[in-house]
Image (spheres, rainbow, N blue to C red):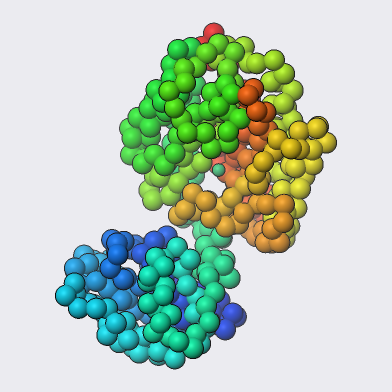
Amino acid sequence: MTETATRLAALREKMRQTETDLVALGPGSHMQWLVGFHPHADERPCLLLVSEAGECFLMPALNAEGSRENTDIAFHTWSDDERPDAALAAALGAIGADKAKSVVLDETMRADFALRLLGALPDAKHTFTGETVGALRMRKGESEFARLKTSAAVADRALQKAFAAIKPGMSEKELATVIRDHFASEGAIPLFTIVGSGPNGAFPHHQTGERKLAEGDAVVIDIGARKGGLPSDITRMAAVGRPPEGYGQVHTIVERAVEAALAAARPGVKAKEVDAPARRVISDAGYGEYFVHRTGHGLGIDGHEPPYITATSETVLEEGMVFSIEPGIYIPRRFGIRLEEIVILRADGPEIFSSLPRDLHVSGA
Ligand code: CO
């Protein structure tokens, strides 16, 4: 069976369990996961429609020939000088979905695509993909694991390049360029390169800027790039010379929070039961108000995807799920510390992708 056939079968099983008549995906990550590609995404309505009876595309005519190289699923095409309504009606009819009562919509599709589809199915109620495509995407196969691991190794090397390059007087942007250049040298497409130096590190999603690194700065380096279609995401800490007053103690607390979450992550445990021990370590140390985000997020085709490791998530973690563990402490006007691992959940616990230690890397002095 091809990967697409396996995934379509698994999706139909979820559709039966959730009494879903139709799944409609736009050109994006869900479609990429299901059929291994997606046509060019623009304002032209383009949908992959899946029912119990079959699957087909509503396809802009100009993308048909190119898409045919990637799939043998039937197309219902429409051209720029007509409206897509007739092709959409034909597509729904062809897979017996023209009377669909319950529709799962790709939450990332354009609102006008979604409204057009719901307009063609006036009796349908809709939900999003959480219990169908989303649930399936959380568990990774060994081939996805291998590709994610390759991507993670590139990020490890990019971080090591950054550590080696750090020196006083260099700007955050210049350090980010070293990282991006390394990604490019390994054929990876940079997704984000957060360099938060000194007080900027206290902004979890700092916009890497012109601030120059100075002696005594702690530097948050959070980077990711797409290699072989799959992203990386890792955060480590560096210091320019001696770290700031009080740094070491806070780093140790964040490290203990990472270890507590790693120790709690097991198949069968709820996501909130992984967030809780990390949060407890930080709260018990008196820094609870400075841990301003969830403990982690899933990683797959998208850099952020389910499962989300939050204080309230009831999602039960399963073997094969890939997610981050990245607690942080952000002290306004002083420094921030985040340590991030990506893990795959194995039967006996998490396996970490990165081979880099989480210690502070002291550079440039
Ligand atoms: Co992350």
**Quadrant of the rendered structure where residue 337 is?**
top right
Residue 237 as seen in the image, left or right of residue 73: right
Residue 245 as seen in the image, left or right of residue 146: right
Residue 325 drawn above or below residue 73: above
Q: Position of residue 117 (x, y in %)?
A: 39, 78
Instruction: Give me the residue at 71% from left, 61% from top.
Output: 314
Residue 57 drawn above or below residue 326: below
Q: Nearer the viewer, residue 282 or 229?
A: 282
Q: Position of residue 317 (x, y in %)?
A: 67, 58
Q: Position of residue 311 (x, y in %)?
A: 72, 52
- Residue 206 seen in render: yes
Q: Nearer the viewer, residue 115 or 280?
A: 115
Q: Quadrant of ligand 1?
A: top right
Residue 249 as seen in the image, left or right of residue 354: right
Instruction: Give me the residue at 27% from left, 73% from top.
Output: 59
Residue 327 drawn above or below residue 107: above
| Quarter of the figure that contains the N terminus | bottom left
Instruction: Give me the residue at 65% from left, 16% from top.
Output: 244
Outermost residue to the left: 81
**Quadrant of the rendered structure where residue 157 is?**
top left
Residue 210 drawn above or below residue 154: above
Instruction: Give me the residue at 49% from left, 80% from top.
Output: 103
| Quarter of the figure that contains the C terminus | top right
Number of numbered markers: 0
Outermost residue to the right: 284
Q: Nearer the viewer, residue 23 or 145?
A: 23
- Residue 157 seen in render: no
